[in-house]
Amino acid sequence: MRNNLDTKLLFELSQPGRRAMQLPACDVPAQPPEQLLPGESLASSPPPLPELSEPQVIRHFINLSQRNMSVDTHFYPLGSCTMKYNPKRNERAAAMPAFADLHPYQPVETLQGMLQVLYEMQTYLQEISGLDACCLQPAAGAHGELTALWVAAAYFRDIDEKRNRVLVPDSAHGTNPASAAMAGFKAVTIKTTQAGIVDQEDFQRKLDEKVAVLMITNPNTVGIFESQIQEMIAAVHAVGGLVYLDGANMNAILGITRPGDWGSEGVDMQHFNPHKTFSGPHGGGGPGAGPICVVEKLAPYLPSPVVVREQEAGESARYYLDFERPQSIGRVRAFFGSVGVLLRAYCYIRTHGPDGLRQVSENAVLNANYLLSRVKHFLPVPQGNRCMHEFVASAQALKNDKKVTAMDVAKRLLDYGFHAPTVYFPLTVKEAIMVEPTETESKETLDAFAETLFRITEEDPDLLRDAPHTTPISRPDEVQAARQPVLCHLAN
Amino acid sequence: MTFFYNTPENQQAMLEAIGARSLDELFEPIPEELKLQHPLQLPPALSELELDQHLRELAVGNQHAGQKICFLGGGCYDHFIPAAVDTIGSRSEFYTSYTPYQAEVSQGNLQVIFEYQSLMTRLTGLDISNASLYDGGSATAEAVLMAIADTRRYGKVVVPETLHPEYRQTIATYVENLGVAVETVATPSGLLQPDDLSAHVDDQTACVVLQQPNFFGCLEDASSVVQTTHQAGALLVGVFDPISLGLLARPGDWSAPGEGADIAVAEGHTLGTPMSYGGPFLGIMCCRENLVRRMPGRIVGQTVDRRGKPCYVLTLQTREQHIRREKATSNVCTNQGLFALRATAHLSLFGPQGLRETANLCLQKSRYAADQICQHQRFELAFPEPTFKEFVIRDRKANVGELMETSLAAGYLAGIPLAPWYPERADCFLVAVTEKRTKAEIDGLVDALIGATNAVTTSIS
């Protein structure tokens, strides 16, 4: 049922004296807190939290859950986000007390199963990337980028080279230049061509011995494989720089090609998005994880600790945490990492195996190309007839002819029960509509989506400009939200 | 083929529609010499049943907090999680959605984040909360970056040794390449002393970071730290324990009502998210209103839709990387949505009284545990200052390693040795007692520690 009315805030439902939680009586001799703690450290009263009953709380949140689209309820072709189905076996695994109820400072003797999973994840990611070493600590893809740039900075400091620039294509995620700036580098934008790939002339012009890192997404955000990647890597290496692969689009190339094998030397660093490539889930925004893999010469700089395995003849393997890494950049967060996300990714890799992972990418690319073949006839796809795991259509013609924007199309899709694709990204395509179906969708779903999209392009423009019509709210006033920010509920 | 989302017939029909002869043809844009010529060297696929069996085998190698009685803390705690939090957190309409870019079909997530932000401001006494960050450690480092940007002081940031060592390490990594020094104030007394702080804070100091209760569990003189910091024109970053706020003053009020931390950050997993070997977790961040445009991460605001209906939307996005790119306040592009949801549900269930009672149980039980342990002449409190739910025990025999081993054999995760971070305190360990620990468990811990003592005595004689 979608016609529930409960959108009141928790604070509006609250009544003084209502309670959902009962706590045990204190079973040790107790003294008033005022006698145990200094007066100035105490609050005069507990914080003004809402007071609710358990059924109120449950009904509130369950009703709110129904005001969301999600992968479990709708096709969610959000380009660049790899919204594939999240297998439930992974959820069951992560909830096992043997994994969920572990404390990060337990002795390693009590963590051998956990550490084995994490050690094997390190080796799996090394194998999938073709790189030599792995660190699982970063908490998200953007955090992995930042960590890799810190690693690069430490490397150049160590070899006493002053390099302050990071090259980033204009089609890259905004996190790339933002990470570069946070790591103390100057982000330099390189252009992409009409064909959607890095402009080699602009790249050559901006490449010099001041460049620390080239950050490249491949396949790129337009869904095209950068075919000149070998030459670009060689050119960066020739001036002494490093190459970083933004692993956002690994879903297209699992078992097909490895970034560490690109050209004679391959990329030097990359991150993974286990919440995307290895089936997440996305959690309404997070948690994610952002493990990184690097070549041998950068391994000493990875954050500490890493998991190490040792095995003496005739004995079973033992796993421990290695903190004795003097060249390490240190920590990028507290504790080991996004272990719950990594455990789900481990389950995903184990249930797919080498052939299954390759089929993931084959089917992701097949689904994207099939959808492209149906869509391009009525919604131009500027960058070609074929794609990898995603493609970017343009609503520019619709805008010219009917004054209908990419946003209007996106909003109208919501009326038909489809989550919208990513719109207005990458910035290099006008009126961009970025579609990533993923491998877990059936042909019937793709057909229904293509037919709906076609129908929308034929609809009355006014209907589109005012869409969506069937969702719990119509378009929000974003200008008011930013000009007169109301960022929390104020108590009277 | 492991999983069949489409049949071979479907695939054939799709290839024909594309005009491709084979799946391989779709990968022609990848230069042939770059293609992997052999299968990945990974273990063969397991069925779900086999995965289940495999995980059970791995599980045998772990001893979890349901098997060993957990007295470990240090920023990660074994607090109780009500069943209703799991019910809400298991709703796949929440956990299989993503960042609410399409507000019209994300009002569930957006309202939850708005409620989360509201709860956090009420908890901390500050004006603004973001939608959450990765964890307590990285949130602290982000707060330091905010302070540097806001004060435009690139000289140094000041952190006492009583701040979580891993938070200090994280801050050091975040500022390493920015030319900002991290000055660490020694705290031999277990507290940051006002004179020691004054000696470090100057007009080039961007901020002071104070953890309350501190890493040793002790209550700092937060009021004087706030004053010293503000007198120098620096910002105070307060690191708090959400559970403690059932009893303790809110970070925004540490010095006086409305005067305290300028930015407050915390590890929020204790609000409804299991320990999970340290992550993924929930980074809470709140600040004063004048700092809102420096804030990293997502923020949700209330507005109206085209028909005037109140609704929620991501806002103040001109701070963020997808618009500002290299000029953004941070590279953070998501929040910890699922754990913000769990924290919101958790606090809704606990309410003010539930939080207060939880905090009081932690206080009473930890004091009881400390008293009982120190009954024995081998042990003393390392610091005499008042504590909340954790305390540091000094072993007069300086044999913490063996104590931990024998306690473990008796079924207890007895504490965290301080040696790795504080070599001069190699005779100390940190003990945490949450509301979950019963008197019997605490008495058992004491017996285990004393039993260890007796065992050692025997082996010496």
Image (spheres, helix red, strand yellow):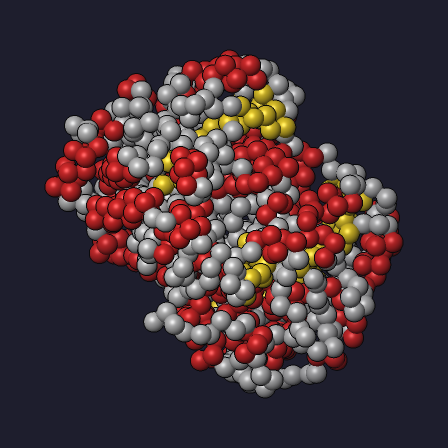
The residue shown at (43%, 64%) is A472
The residue shown at (74%, 73%) is A42
For the residue pair B47 and B125, the one nearer the viewer reads as: B125
Name the quadrant of the C terminus of chain B: bottom right
User: In this rendering, does residue B298 appear at all?
Assistant: yes
Report whether B58 appears left or right of B318. Answer: left
For the residue pair A287 and B109, the one nearer the viewer reads as: B109
User: In this rendering, does residue A112 appear at all?
Assistant: no
Q: Position of residue A256 (x, y in %)?
A: 29, 30
Name the quadrant of the N terminus of chain B: top left
Q: Position of residue A106 (x, y in %)?
A: 50, 57
For the residue pair A163 and A304, the one nearer the viewer reads as: A163
Q: Is residue B89 above or below residue A375?
A: below
The residue shown at (44%, 36%) is A400
Q: Position of residue B350 (x, y in %)?
A: 55, 76
Number of numbered callouts drawn: 0
For the residue pair A20 and A1, the one nearer the viewer reads as: A1
Q: Is residue A398 above or below residue B303?
A: above
Q: Position of residue B35 (x, y in %)?
A: 29, 24
Q: Quadrant of residue A277?
A: top left
Report whether B20 appears left or right of B198. Answer: left
Report whether B252 appears left or right of A409. Answer: right
The residue shown at (66%, 73%) is A491
